[in-house]
């Protein structure tokens, strides 16, 4: 998606005619609809829509488009957001000691697969500094002691604000962020949980997976919420394992799942494919080349 | 999908406004659009659409709906078909000696997962008669000799016509149907090929997979065409294997893939999720409960 | 594995020379070792072994083999069991209302893939009687009321004893067996849990999976223990799902995983591939054709 | 596997007593057998064995161990090789323009997951130089013209010899190596083929996969042989795709499979888990922590 797109994310109560009216609006404004995806949740009686347009068809200002669409939205009682792919988002990566997720994000970024800037990496340890250095990303070391976590969170916040960060990625960041922090970045913090949630919530899931003798292990990327490990799930994956895998072996297999799942979730977010509803996510599948 | 639906499958060259005009038509005719799925093929510049409607909203005759929609279709140059879920299709199963695919189809049918009638099973052997008997499906044994294959195909055709068969499923049927036969049932014959096509086309794929030492084996369901093993692929799946699997072991693992893949492909067809374009299929994913 | 095998399952504390001494014993007794699989659990410092022999090499009585091997076992402090593949086990299937697992077991059995007899199916409902009838398996209907569950369990036990049942398969049997019952059949009851344990233990896992918006669902086959849903896991599998799957859709996808996982677990048990240690299973992979 | 191990790879015709005699030898020499894996190929009547020992138990010289084991080997007609994990192998990476496989190898190497040195990267282009620089690996740019391929292969050979290279990894290297070159490094060149072989051998497999409308794509790592794309397969994997993936989308999905499959194959080789027999590989599964 190097090309120039406008993406609308829309949600509302289900009723007749929404798709007709929305698509007619875009047609009459001269847009070519590149993709139009809908989902009707019959359990909640809710309707979700993602429309992606060719930005070259926009012949007037963004403000004008917003105000015109708002008329449709008001009459149909739509909640909506619009995103322009040429506005690259700023992504901050928070890490602790393990490097695999950081590596994968920076590598995919450097190969052009994540449409964003990564202005900084923050860590409470020095271990992944060399990865940041390799990719020439500014690295901030904010060591955390028994006493300074509140102040260091303030410092992180200051850095995020200074760098105008749109998305915070917790790439195996092992500190628990305060409610205040999380609420300031609602649905803008993606965490990777090193387990196939809701199994093995909390610490040491691979050890516990070993003790329980599970035959598959997995990882889960989700939006961070106040309620630890309980935020809306974005992506999950698993790998088959056996009795023969030690806790250390499971950790290694798990690392490969974690990096893959986290990078996918970040990409879905950056491509504006996700709508959160209650504690669930609607993730519209990729259909563009 | 026990409920009552009308499904339109539409294809045309891509141009602005199609979705707006099509959905506006259904809205103005009083329909609640249950699902609306589109796919734009940028390589071929083609547009594909599947619209599913609540049949209870149809307040006039089927003919009237067809003739009204035809006006839209003419102006937009659409190719289209419409299906009513209450018209259960008649499915004939053709089998030879192995029973696993027949079992799976009849079982899923008897559990209500395939929206069709199965008026008959035809085989050139007696081996699967007991399965047909178990499920109370009329079984026709048409033994094939060196000389009588042409006549037996006539007989099969006669049976299919008598039973008003809409779909022929080749459930590991080991005879090659004539071009005449296949052309009489274009895109109405689904075959299961016991390999992950296009790998190992032709006979004995599991033996050849063993000799080649592959690490995964698979199966492919496709529409039968004149060009053997080359018809549009509907569904595929694979399973991990190892050096430790003998040709017989691979065959057994393969059987479980074959049955699963064939049943899925038949269900996609019966639910009108498939549009064939060139030698490819567009398979719209299941999104209804 | 239609052929005639003798299988030894062995476990002990890890120490030098076990494999040499055990394999030397079989060699000196004139056996061809068909497969010899070991696993050393470094966490528990335990050693597990599965040896499978060609039964045609047994030139004396079973008792003699047992008593000879016992000498080796005593000196090495081995726990061991021996199984003769020609002794087909008797398997009882317990079901409630849903048929998919029963279908899969009976079908695989009738295709010769499960080395056992199935002398009876017991259910607290009539719903799967037609499946039992189809496959000509005696069906016992034991309806359960608020008051009679203790007596009906006695009746089930009586039936199992009468039919000399070696393995009880709970094929979506929805009643909770008493501790007494379970303890009478320790490691001889296989249950299918309709979730990827330990996620969503207990009832309605598909509904809860929907509400949690998970991206994969799965099923778990395990030995039944006193502690519900906590017995040693034998086999698990998952399938990718999306927001688009309703609770009913998830149930259907889940059914296909359940049947596959349960049949696999039963086969592993019947082929004597499983050693239970603590709350884990060692499942030696299939390596014979 | 940071620990110190001795690994024997053994193959021979199947006969009684091999495992007893081999394991008795190691036991009597005072070794603790860490893992002992066997595979009997009943089709070829061949026997394969991998024994891994604790190197701390070696109380005499490597030469002495070799000469002692050779006596056993002669009497049993074994082919065998022995490897010491403390002898790190030298791996050369050959690349062209795409970076994803190079990235993955260097990253896994830098995280300690590949037990080897990587003394150099060679490429016919400059595109991946920045990756080599990032990881501080010497990079050799050997541009290839219509005329100089023979000389440049000589130069590559010279570099490999100078750096005492044990394994050559073709990480999407797009030039065809001469028979002479390949024969000089028999079973020491691992190639990644960007298709699920034997499907879509040759060029542009993702384009052809698109045109054929396949529902899964994959990649294959194999030893390079004279016969292009036909060498013994080491590892394969696939990912589900749909009609919605363009050739470019398939390429991207494929890249993620390629990197994973290639890194796995390289790890299997470095851990001495592979025995080649005919055109197949025996890959003993990982069982150590």
Image (cartoon, coloured by chain):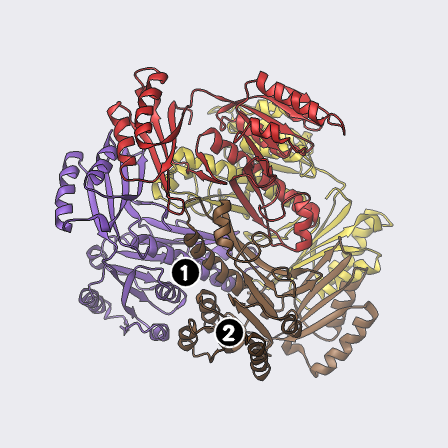
Chain colours: A red, B purple, C brown, D yellow
C146 in relation to D219, above or below: below
Pick whichever, A220 or C284, lies toward us. Answer: A220
Q: Chain of mark 1?
A: B
Pick whichever, C90 or B216, lies toward us. Answer: C90
Q: Position of residue D143 (x, y in %)?
A: 53, 23
Tell me the number on the disc at residue C71. none
Is residue D92 visible in the rendered image? The answer is no
Rounded to the nearest angstrom, the CA distance separating label 1 from label 2 is 39 Å
Q: Residues within 10 Å of mark 1 (few under 14, many from 20)?
A: many
Image-based side of D37 in relation to A230, left or right? right
Residue furthest to the right in view is D59
D243 in relation to C92, above or below: above
Q: Locate the N terminus of chain A by quadrant.
A: top left
SS state under label 1 = helix
Residue name at image x 41 percent, y 60 percent: B259
Q: Position of residue B163 (x, y in %)?
A: 20, 66
Q: Position of residue A233 (x, y in %)?
A: 52, 40
Report the number of numbered marks.
Answer: 2
Pick whichever, B21 or B108, lies toward us. Answer: B21
Q: Residues within 10 Å of mark 2 (few under 14, many from 20)?
A: few
Q: Locate the C terminus of chain A by quadrant.
A: top left
SS state under label 2 = loop
* Closer to the eye: label 1 or 2: 2
A36 in relation to B112, above or below: above
Q: Position of residue A280 (x, y in %)?
A: 48, 41
Q: Chain of mark 2?
A: C
Q: Which residue is mark 2?
A: C145
Residue name at image x 44 percent, y 75 percent: C132
Image-based side of B85 in relation to A128, left or right? left
Q: Which residue is mark 1?
A: B259
Is residue C21 visible in the rendered image? The answer is yes
Where is residue C133, by image quadrant?
bottom left
């Amino acid at each position: 998606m190097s090309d120039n797109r406008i993406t609308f994310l829309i949600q509302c109560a289900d009723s007749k005619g929404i798709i007709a009216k929305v698509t007619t609006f875009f047609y009459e404004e001269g847009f070519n609809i590149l993709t139009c995806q809908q989902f009707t949740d019959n359990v909640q009686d809710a309707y979700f829509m993602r429309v992606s347009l060719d930005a070259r068809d926009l012949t007037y200002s963004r403000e004008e488009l917003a105000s015109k669409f708002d008329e449709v939205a008001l009459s149909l009682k739509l909640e909506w957001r619009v995103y322009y792919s040429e506005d690259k988002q700023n992504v901050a990566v928070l890490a602790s000691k393990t490097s695999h997720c950081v590596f994968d994000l920076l590598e995919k970024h450097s190969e052009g697969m994540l449409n964003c800037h990564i202005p900084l990496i923050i860590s409470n340890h020095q271990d992944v500094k060399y990865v940041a250095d390799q990719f020439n990303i500014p690295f901030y070391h904010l060591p955390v002691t028994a006493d300074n976590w509140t102040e260091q969170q303030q410092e992180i916040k200051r850095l995020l604000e200074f760098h105008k960060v749109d998305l915070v990625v917790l790439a195996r960041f092992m500190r628990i962020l305060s409610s205040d922090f999380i609420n300031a970045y609602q649905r803008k913090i993606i965490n990777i949980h090193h387990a196939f949630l809701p199994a093995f919530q909390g610490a040491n899931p691979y050890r516990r997976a070993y003790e329980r003798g599970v035959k598959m292990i997995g990882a889960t990327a989700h939006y961070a919420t106040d309620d630890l490990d309980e935020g809306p799930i974005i992506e999950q994956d698993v790998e088959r394992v056996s009795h023969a895998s030690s806790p250390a072996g499971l950790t290694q297999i798990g690392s490969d799942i974690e990096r893959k799942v986290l990078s996918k979730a970040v990409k879905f977010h950056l491509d504006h494919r996700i709508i959160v509803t209650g504690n669930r996510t609607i993730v519209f599948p990729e259909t563009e080349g």
